[in-house]
Amino acid sequence: MSQSPEPSAGSPGVSGGARQLLGMKGAAGTSNIWKIRLQLMKPVTWIPLIWGVICGAAASGNFHWTLPEVGASVACMLMSGPLLAGYTQTINDYYDREIDAINEPYRPIPSGAIPLGQVRLQIVVLLLAGLAVAWGLDVWAGHSTPVLLLLALGGSFVSYIYSAPPLKLKQNGWLGNYALGASYIALPWWAGQALFGQLTWTTALLTLAYSLAGLGIAVVNDFKSVEGDRALGLQSLPVVFGVQRASWISAGMIDLFQLAMVAVLIAIGQHFAAVLLVLLIIPQITFQDIWLLRDPVAFDVKYQASAQPFLVLGMLVTALAIGHSDLTPIAALTAPLP
Ligand SMILES: C/C(=C\COP(=O)(O)OP(=O)(O)O)CCC[C@H](C)CCC[C@H](C)CCCC(C)C
């Protein structure tokens, strides 16, 4: 059960062993089954989910730094990141094993590092654990409708149809990437907001619009696998539009829908947050100019590493502003009367 290392490097400055544990490109080989399991769960992809929960808690306008609430938020992050994102990534690698044999043959499944039965067991355990934690959080929050459990069920269903046939949403560049963007931005936000406050239709729709910027980010993930995607008939945006035009679509979506949030912040009277968000969009446009639009195949990882922190900070700024605005029931109730 040996696993061959990936020949090409991922992001600089991270050792092969660390990449292996984080599930990043450029991982070193290992025969330790627990390290391989962790690699399948791709810890590096948990971060946006965990961050989304923080944004949701901020947008609830009702998070307090008390031990029970910090504990509940950590449990919600555990559910969203290690358990459900871990489940998502494992199921994705399971159903992608043929395409990965072309694009990334060093991954645990195509390299034969872990038997398929063990992968199936991992999928079931992670899913059940994620659903159990979601249900426990509903009990803790005293929800009459088990919102967290419903979100977790919805998210795991989307994960399944994203990767598994017959739907395999990832085959369609628009649908698949929107499912990915919405699941990474809107779903954990909704979970955090529902856990501490109340999820409203307005914030639900706003986060779905924000997720269109997530679609743009998801496209960046497709540049590395154009060859294999084309060979297997996957309609990713770089395959359909070509690498250069897809990079413009990606950058356009990322910028346009963040700017749409700036407009929303202005409309709800959160002017300081609107200015901050603009200041956070500017470096992203700069990195698009020097990395993404120049050579997205060579610089995809560099672009993500440089621009992503600004995008996620912008999400937090937006969430905090929403949490302090009339869009949030609690903030609206406690706002001074005119
Ligand atoms: C598997 C995912 C991306 C990888 O896609 P792809 O195969 O194109 O790329 P690689 O070649 O790099 O493997 C992510 C898919 C996300 C999915 C649609 C939904 C995720 C759901 C959440 C984890 C559920 C969270 C629910 C919670 C917050 C209530």
Image (spheres, grey):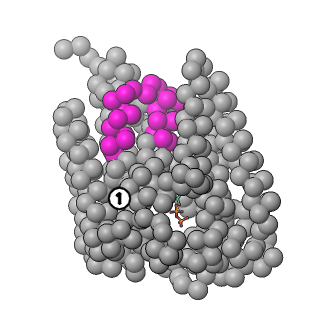
Q: Position of residue 46 (x, y in %)?
A: 56, 54
Residue at far bottom of view? 7
Using the image as rendered, state which of residue 216 and residue 57 is in the foreground: 216
Q: Is residue 273 above or below residue 241?
A: above
Residue at 43%, 46% in the rendered image:
182
Q: Quadrant of residue 308?
A: bottom left
Residue at 60%, 72% in the rendered image:
100
Q: Which residue is mark 1?
A: 216
Residue at 77%, 79% in the rendered image:
2
Looking at the rendered structure, the secondary structure element under dot 1 is helix
Q: Position of residue 271 (x, y in %)?
A: 19, 39
Q: Position of residue 146 (x, y in %)?
A: 59, 25
Q: Is residue 326 above or below residue 8?
A: above
Query: Is 195 in the magenta?
Result: yes
Q: Is residue 297 above or below residue 308?
A: below
Query: Is 151 in the magenta?
Result: no
Can see residue 46?
A: no
Using the image as rendered, state which of residue 164 and residue 266 is in the foreground: 164
Which range of residues does the magenta coloring cover?
187-210
Which quarter holds ligand 1? bottom right
Q: Quadrant of residue 251?
A: bottom left
Amino acid type shown at disc 1 = Gly
Can see residue 88?
A: yes
Image quarter of the C terminus: top left
